[in-house]
């Protein structure tokens, strides 16, 4: 079974990836308002990019021992 192979951290990573793809592409359920090209979504994408940059920097610093 797949649950025996993946830990809770693997499932969390999968959920984060799916959520990030949905947020960046603007996927939405039927019958909801379209927000993909609004200013709010632009700011959300910018914040997401900043978080990724900060986490990548922290991972680089932790890996290099600094």
Image: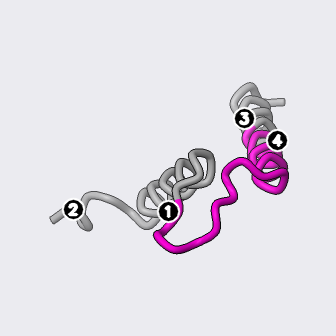
Estimate the spatial distance between the alpha carbons at disc 3 and disc 4, rounded to whole Å. Answer: 10 Å
What residue lies at 69% left-to-right and 31% top-to-bottom? 63
The boundaries of the magenta stretch are 28-52
**Is residue 34 part of the magenta span, yes or no?**
yes
In this rendering, position of residue 15 left or right of residue 4: right
Q: Could you say whether the residue bearing mark 3 is in a helix, strand or loop?
A: helix
Tag 3 and tag 1, C-beta contact below 8 Å: no
| Quarter holding residue 4 | bottom left
User: What mark, if any, has residue 56 been given in the picture?
Assistant: 3
Tag 1 and tag 4, C-beta contact below 8 Å: no
Residue at the spot of label 1: 12
What residue lies at 72% left-to-right and 47% top-to-bottom? 37
User: What mark, if any, has residue 50 been given in the picture?
Assistant: 4
Q: Nearer the viewer, residue 22 or 7?
A: 22
Tag 3 and tag 4, C-beta contact below 8 Å: no
| Quarter holding residue 16 | bottom right
**Extreme residue in the top direction:** 64
Which colour style is shown?
Answer: one colour
> Is residue 22 shown above or below 63?
below
**Is residue 15 part of the magenta span, yes or no?**
no
What residue lies at 78% left-to-right and 35% top-to-bottom? 53
Going from N to C along the chain, the mark reached first, 3 or 2, is 2
Tag 4 and tag 2, C-beta contact below 8 Å: no
Rendering coords of residue 42 (x, y %)? 79, 46
Residue at the spot of label 2: 2
């Amino acid at each position: 079974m797949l649950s025996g192979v993946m830990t809770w951290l693997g499932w969390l990573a999968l959920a984060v990836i799916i959520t990030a793809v949905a947020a960046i592409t603007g996927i939405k359920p039927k019958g909801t308002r379209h927000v993909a090209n609004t200013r709010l979504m632009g700011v959300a994408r910018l914040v997401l990019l900043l978080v990724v940059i900060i986490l990548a920097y922290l991972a680089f610093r932790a890996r290099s021992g600094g």
